[in-house]
Amino acid sequence: MGSIRQEKPKSPISGWIPAIGFIMMVTFAVIGWALSDPLLEWTVDYFNGFEGNELDDVHPDAMQFAFGAFIWLVLLCAGSLIVAAAAPRKKSRVKEKDLKTEKDDIIKEKKRRKKRQIEMQKEAARQRKAKREREE
């Protein structure tokens, strides 16, 4: 039931997909860095007791870098979800009728093998019986 598969020609944009992904990552990094300072200030204002420099041995820009990395990661996840949802799916070329006939063929083959096995066991039993009768 095999068929020769013919590959579709690739779209011209498929070669640019890695470059587009890299550009998205860089863009999200720039947005994350730009939004990190306002987010850090908002966090200091919103959460009492948080001053943004709780770790004494850390450079002052480290907290801004951490916030920027967090924003970048969130944007990257959201962008990946959007791209994955918008990507075209391959349509299945398998039909229900083909699956049913294949399943029926498999069941018939199992029955045929079982019947053949029973016949072979009967023949072996006859041969053993005949051998015992000859020995007696």
Image (tube, grey):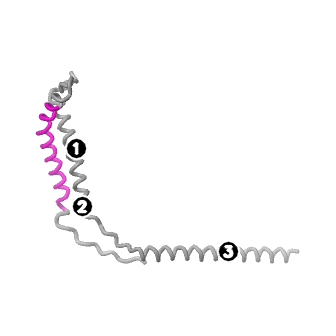
Which of the two discs, 3 and 1, labels the residue nearer the N terminus?
A: 1
Judge the density around disc 3: few (<14), some (14-19), many (≥20) Cα neighbours within 10 Å.
few
Identity, as a three-letter code, of the amino acid under mark 3: Ile
Figure quadrant of residue 51:
top left
Picture coordinates of residue 131, whole percent (x, y):
81, 75
Residue mark closest to the camera, 3 vs 1: 1
Which region is colored magenta? 15-42
Residue ID for mark 1: 74
Identity, as a three-letter code, of the amino acid under mark 1: Val
Residue ID for mark 2: 87
Judge the density around disc 1: few (<14), some (14-19), many (≥20) Cα neighbours within 10 Å.
some
Contact, mark 3 vs mark 2 (Cβ under 8 Å): no
Q: Residue furthest top?
A: 56
Figure quadrant of residue 53:
top left
Residue at 15% across, 41% down: 32
Picture coordinates of residue 30, whole percent (x, y):
12, 43
| Label 1: which secondary element | helix
